[in-house]
Amino acid sequence: MLVLLFVLGACIGSFLCCQARRLHLKTSHHKKLGARSVCLDCGMQLRWYDNIPIISWLILRGKCRKCHHKIGVAELLSEVGVALAFLAIGTTIDIMAAGILDWVGFVLLLGFVTVMCFLAIYDGLYGELPLLFLIIGIVWAGVILILNEISIITSVGFTIDLVYKPILAMLILGGLYLVLYLVSKGKWVGDGDWLLGVAIGMVLFEPWLALIELFLANAIACIVMLPFVLKRKNSKIYFGPFLVVALVIVLALSDLLNGIIN
C-alpha cells in the first residue's frame, strides 16, 4: 500500500505542478492551453515516456528532449515531495484494523493534502496563493473537522474541548499570520497565508499541534532560506510550502506526539 501511495503521489505531484503552470499562464497571460503537456519554451508536445514522474526528469536531466531548454527542478521537487507526503500520510492508518469511518477520514485527508500540495507548489513557483483553492482547502478542512468531532462524540460523548480546541488551533495559525499581515501591510507575510493557517488549524484540531506546526514551519523556512537571504538580503520568503511540509510531518507523527503529551 505504501509503494502504491508513493507512485500515486508522484503522479499527482506531476499533475499538480503542470496545472499550477497552466493556471498561472492562463491568469497572467490569458493564454488558452491545450489538454496535452508541451514544452513551455519550444512548444513540443511531450510524449508519454517524457511524462513518467521522477524517472523521465532524471533520464532527460531536467531538459526538453527537443530544444534542451532547462525544465527546472520544480517538477522533480513536486513529484518527489507529493510522493513523500502521500507515503507519510499512509503511515497514519492501520489497514488491518481500520473501519469504514477510518477509511473515509483517510481518503479525505489525502484529498486535503493534495489541495495543500497544490497551494505549496503554486506559492513556491509564483509567490501567490490562489483564493479559490484556499477556499476549497478551508471547506475540505471543515468536512474533516466535522467528521473528527462526530467520531469523538460517538466514542466519548460531547465535551467543551470540541468547541474551543479547533478555534484555538485556527487562532494560533491563521490569527497570528493575519496579525502579521495587517501590521506589516503585507511585507512580512502574504494575504493568503492566514487562510492557509485556518485550514491547517482545523485539520490539526489540537492547539499544541498547531504550535508545533508553527515552530516547524518557521524553523524549516529559516534553515532552507538562510543561504538565499544571506546572498540576497531582499529575498522574499513564501511561507506556503513550509507550512505544508510542516503539516505533513505533524500529521505523520501525530500518534507519537499524542503519546508523548498524554
Image: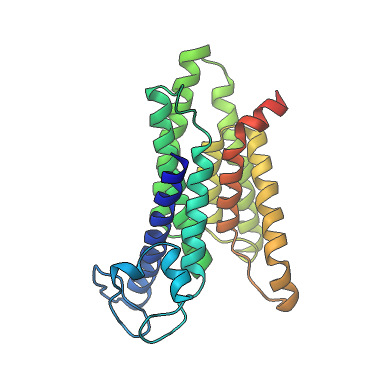
Of 182 and 36, the residue lying toward us? 36
Of 160 and 74, the residue lying toward us? 74
Q: Is residue 4 visible?
A: yes
Image quarter (top left, top right, bottom left or bottom right) of the N terminus: top left
Left/right of residue 206 with respect to residue 96 in the rendered view: right
Q: In which image quadrant can residue 169 be found?
A: top right
Left/right of residue 3 with respect to residue 230 in the rendered view: left
Q: Position of residue 104 (x, y in %)?
A: 38, 30
Q: In which image quadrant can residue 218 be found?
A: bottom right
Q: Position of residue 61 (x, y in %)?
A: 48, 76
Residue drawn at x 29%, y 67% is: 48
Image quarter (top left, top right, bottom left or bottom right) of the C terminus: top right
Left/right of residue 51 with respect to residue 192 in the rendered view: left
* Type of colouring: rainbow
Q: Position of residue 183 (x, y in %)?
A: 66, 58
Residue drawn at x 56%, y 47% is: 197
